[in-house]
Every structure is written in structure tokens, then in C-alpha cells.
Image (tube, rainbow, N blue to C red):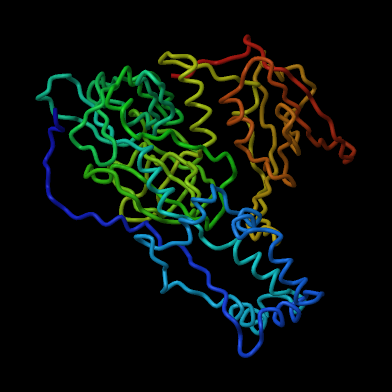
Amino acid sequence: MKKNRLKTLISIMLFAFVLPLCLVLTSCGSQSAYEIAVKNGFTGTEQEWLLSLRGESAYEIAVKNGFTGTEQEWLLSLQGQNGKDAETQNIDTYQAYLSAKENEEIDENYTYLDFLSRFFANSSITSGSYLNKNLMSVVEVYGYTSNSPYANYLNAGSGIIYRIDDNGDAYIITNYHVTYNSSSRNMYPYFKLYLFGQPDIEIEATYLGGIRSYDIAILKVEGSEALKNSNAQVVDFSLQNVSLGQTCYAIGNTSEYGLTVTQGIISVERETISMNVGGVSSYYSEIRHDSYIYHGNSGGGLFDEYGKLIGLTNGGREGTLMNYAIPANVVKAVAENIVSSGESSVTIYSTGIEDNLETTNSLTIYDSGTSTIKISETIVITSIDEESLLSNSGLEVGDKIIKLEYNGIVYDNYQNYLLRNYTLKELLLAGESGDQIKIFVSRESESGETQNVSYETILSDYFTKILK
């Protein structure tokens, strides 16, 4: 059984594949490597210097300075296409160090070893092996109103593989708008999926559940021998905050011609946009990136340079490279919720204030230690729902939230886990009965004095709301 679509022989360049960087350390002038080491901070004999080089392997140094992956993956990252050295990418790191000093880009006391550490940490170490694996974790998605072998698909998109069981059952994450039939105002009853490089092997799926307000849906595959016997891969979620300028790769069914890879960067770490999903316009908190995507990419994956999923692509502004993706932590939380409920409606916890928070002041902070930008927000409680978890908490309208602690993890403007206007709402997507929440606020009294107060609550099954 084949896809009922026009098969045009075209050549598609996967222009996101990047030749990995091959670093070559070269001598400078007549100085030996030992003399350079002494000049840049090493103290000891030449024999001691040689022994010091045996302390850690090159792979261990790479891991220490940011590489994530096996030693085999690291070795692959040092090779160009077809296993050949990327000779055109050779870099004289010592000359780069001298140039950085001459141009006053680094401090006079910055040693060559310091520079190497920074250089390795900031260099792209993406290898084709990550992208190859990611290609096997994304599928083409086609929606049908009939299961007839002669039926034409009415909607096309992409999906990512969330889970595969040994019996061939699987769960696929896609966008709600990919599964929604605007003509019938209902979900498509039949779907066909295709793995990368297998355009003639159909995998049948059905709609399990979704949340329109997050543009996320789950498709279920039952007992598929094709999937069971394939090399399909489950996606690996990254739950870290993305950074401005971070490299990213979009994989999806671009223009319905099959799965392709495009490269870009994170343009805005998070912004609120208005989108029409399922015939209803809503506001969504999204990552903006400039990887090229087009019709058919919806529901595909946005990956970082280490092969981790950082978002689910779901839209963009036509004629621009302003494209959007739902953050991975939101995708994972909603997917877990839908799969565990196994129904078309899911349970989301509510404390009574997460939809009533306002950002009154936003400050951009440059962190020189990590060379990244962080956003500090002043979050004010604008209202508290009656009969909610926080209705009798002592918290008041006008309180400024300065810190949040969820199951022992602290979110504020000074930790790795930043506190943003949307933090509590997104944490509650995966909320479970028994979860502990502490909210710390500052309050200004009538006399102008500021006092800090806190409130602790435990989620219970009683305080929930149903979203469809």
C-alpha cells in the first residue's frame, strides 16, 4: 500500500549537516610545545609536563568541557564526511589565542590552557550520528477520513516518537492542528505514518488525545510489525533552558516531500504569540528559531547540537525565518498526561493563580560566566480564584513572586532554573497529587515597608480542571 500522492523525483539537499570541527594544534615558530606550555603557565620539568598529558584522555577533556556522548560518538565528531578529516576546517588554536590577546578579547592573564578550555566548550561538536538518530525518531504524518486504500490524505504533518513497546505499540507526539479536521470540526479518524527512507511502508495510527490550548496531540500505534522491526528511535528530551544564539536543527515533512533537516539558531528563547489552532485563536508561549520550516513541518522535532529534543515545531510567519516551537518541557509534560489518562481529555492541576500573573518589569542580564543572556522578571499576582488552593493562603493581589519551590527544586532569578511568568503553569502540566509547592512573595505595607511571606500547598485530586 503506497501513499496516494504525486511522486516527483527531486533532489533535496539536507543543508543542515555540518562538517564537524577538526582541531589541529600546531607549533608556533621555533618554540617547542613544552616551551609554549611554560610560557602560558605550566611550572615543572619537561618530563613532568609529558606526564601531565597522560592525566586525562582527549575524550575525558572533551567531556569535561561540554561534550555529551559516548567515546565512539566523540571520535565520529572528529571526522568529516565519509570518515575523512575535515582538512579545510583545521585551526591553529595558538594563533587564535595570540590574536584574541592582541585584540584585547581576553585578559592579559588569560593562559593558553584557559583559552583551549573555552575554545573546546564553545566549539560545535555536532556529528552526523546525532542527526541520523534524530531522523529515525521523526515520522511523516497523514490524516484521512477513510481507511480505504484509495483514499487521499487531507492533511499532512510530522510527528516525533515518544514511546515504542516490544509488541509494536507506540505513541507519537504531533500538533493538535495536524490531527484536527477543520471541515468536520473533529479529529481525523485514520492516520498513516512513514519512517525516514521508507516511503512505501505504512504504519497505521489513531488519535488518542490532545490539548488544543497547547497545540499538542498523541497518536497511538497498535501492534505494528513494521515499526517493531524497524530502527525507529525514541526522542531524548532536553529539559534545560535554551539560550539565545544556540544552534538548532528542525526535522520534519517539509512541503510534504519527506523528512528533511534544516539548521538554524534560537532567535528568542521564549515569547508569546497568537495562533489559530482548531478554529480558535489563543496565545502560546513559544521558542522562536530561524531553521527553515514550511507546511508539513508541523509536529516535527527541533533538536539541539547534541541530539536532544528542545521543541516541537508548530508554526511560523510566512515569508520570514520567524518560526516557532513548543518548548520540550511542555511537550513532555502534556504527552505524559495524555498517555497516562488514555482519553481525549486530560487532567491539569490548578492552584488558582497560574493564569493570573502579570510581568510588570523585565530585565535582561548578561551572564559573563556562561556567556549567555538571562531574563529577570517581576511577577505580580493580579487575582486569586475563589475556592482555589490559594484562596485562603494569606497571599494577596499585588504580591510579587520572588521565588518558587516545586518538589524541592528552586526557581528564581539566580539559579539554573529561572523563574518566569509561565513557570508555575508549565510545572502544573505534569502535576500529580501530593506535589509540594512553596511560593515566596514580597509585599509592600501601607507604610511603605517591604516584608517577605511564603505559602506552602500540596496538590490534591480535588483541585483540578479538565481541558480538551
Give the quarter of the figure containing the N terminus.
Answer: top left
18 shown above or below 276: below
| Residue placed furthest toward the bottom | 30
Q: Residue furthest left?
A: 150
Quarter of the image with the C terminus is top left
Residue 58 image point, x, y percent: 61, 60
Task: Judge whether 245 appears above or below 409 on screen.
Answer: below
Number of numbered discs on residues = 0
Q: Please provide percent x and percent y for residue 320.
A: 35, 56
Q: Nearer the viewer, residue 412 or 111?
A: 111
From the viewer's side, name the closer residue of 268 and 43: 43
Image height of 134 relative to 434, above or below: below
Does 16 sit left or right of 1 as displayed?
right
Q: Position of residue 369 (x, y in %)?
A: 71, 59
Residue drawn where x is 60% and y is 57% of the image: 62
Residue at 46% over, 19% down: 339
* Residue at the spot 76% in from the left edge and 33% down from the top edge: 399
Residue 410 horizontal side relative to residue 375, left or right: right
In-front residue for pair 306/241: 306
Horizontal and vertical percent position of residue 393: 77, 20
* Up/down of 462 relative to 174, above or below: above
Quarter where residue 41 is shown: bottom right
Identify the image quadrant of residue 158. Answer: top left
Could you tell me which residue is drawn at 81 percent across and 75 percent down? 43
- Quadrant for residue 298, please give it: top left
Judged from this view, the residue extending furthest toward the front is 47
In the depicted view, which residue is nearer to us: 136 or 295?
136
